[in-house]
Image: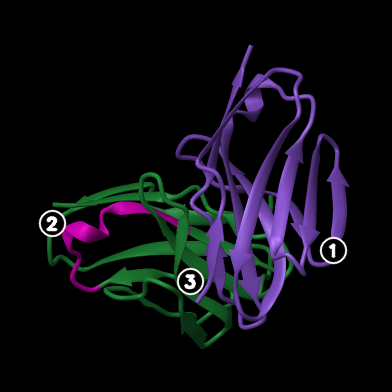
Chain colours: A green, B purple
Amino acid sequence: EAQVTQNPRYLITVTGKKLTVTCSQNMNHEYMSWYRQDPGLGLRQIYYSMNVEVTDKGDVPEGYKVSRKEKRNFPLILESPSPNQTSLYFCASSSTRTGSPLHFGNGTRLTVT
Amino acid sequence: GQSLEQPSEVTAVEGAIVQINCTYQTSGFYGLSWYQQHDGGAPTFLSYNALDGLEETGRFSSFLSRSDSYGYLLLQELQMKDSASYFCAVRTLAGKSTFGDGTTLTVKP
């Protein structure tokens, strides 16, 4: 089944403790992206990648890192999480960087205390 | 930068037709997409317009006017299960994507 898999689904952590949220897609998509969603707001793009070893900042990249060493994986790294990074995170992929639909993972609900 | 404006809430009754508008400001515009999201779930793709005009997919249609930087999503024969949030989104040639803040649609019996 074609899908985007994120892990974990839920994560509670403390300020400053490094964490990684994994994202993997099995559709051979070139484009992958991370978003955060806060109550009452749309999805805000954190980082995106148009291919292996190519990553770019979205609208809210501060406090996050990403890497794209393989086509299928696009992990999101929070080196020193802070409470303002408490949010619902979504990973998405698409076959092209422009018009093809974004396929979303099921989300990771992160709480930083 | 890029920005999108859409109404925050819309209410309609079962069987009715509802239109959700979206205006955008963006550089490097490539196309306008629409996504549906049920409470806390993953957004799912509904429709996409790169060119002016109407795209129809079953009960859902989407329209784009590039000259007016405007689009809308039309939902026909509303069902209770259509109660959800609807987001318009733009992507640029550079790969950046921006979503509107979403429109919460409530369908009443």
Which residue lies at the image location 42% right of the left edge and 73% below the top edge?
A59
**Front one among B22 and A89:** B22
Q: Which residue is mark 2?
A: A14
- In the image, taking residue A27 as reference, residue A87 lies left or right, namely left
Q: Which residue is mark 3?
A: A74
Residue A28, percent across and down? 68, 70
Which amino acid, by three-letter code, is at mark 2? Answer: Val
Q: Looking at the figure, which quarter contains the C terminus of chain B?
A: top right
- In the image, taking residue A46 as reference, residue B9 lies left or right, namely right
Whole-angstrom CA distance, mark 1 to mark 2, is 49 Å
Which amino acid, by three-letter code, is at mark 3? Answer: Phe
Give me the chain letter of mark 2.
A
Residue B82, percent across and down? 65, 29
Q: Which residue is mark 1?
A: B52
Marks 3 and 2: CB-CB under 8 Å? no
User: Local crowd at mark 3 within 10 Å, few (<14), some, or many (≥20)?
Assistant: many
Q: Quadrant of residue A4?
A: bottom right
Which residue lies at the image location 20% right of the left edge and 68% below the top edge?
A18
- In the image, taking residue B91 as reference, residue B41 lies left or right, namely left
Which amino acid, by three-letter code, is at mark 1? Answer: Asp
Disc 1 versus disc 3: nearer the observer? 1
- In the image, taking residue A75 as reference, residue A26 lies left or right, namely right
Q: Element under label 3? A: loop
Marks 1 and 3: CB-CB under 8 Å? no
Is residue B76 covered in magenta?
no
Whole-angstrom CA distance, mark 3 to mark 2, is 23 Å
Disc 1 versus disc 2: nearer the observer? 1
Give me the chain letter of mark 1.
B
Whole-angstrom CA distance, mark 1 to mark 3, is 34 Å
Mark closest to the chain's N terminus, 3 or 2: 2
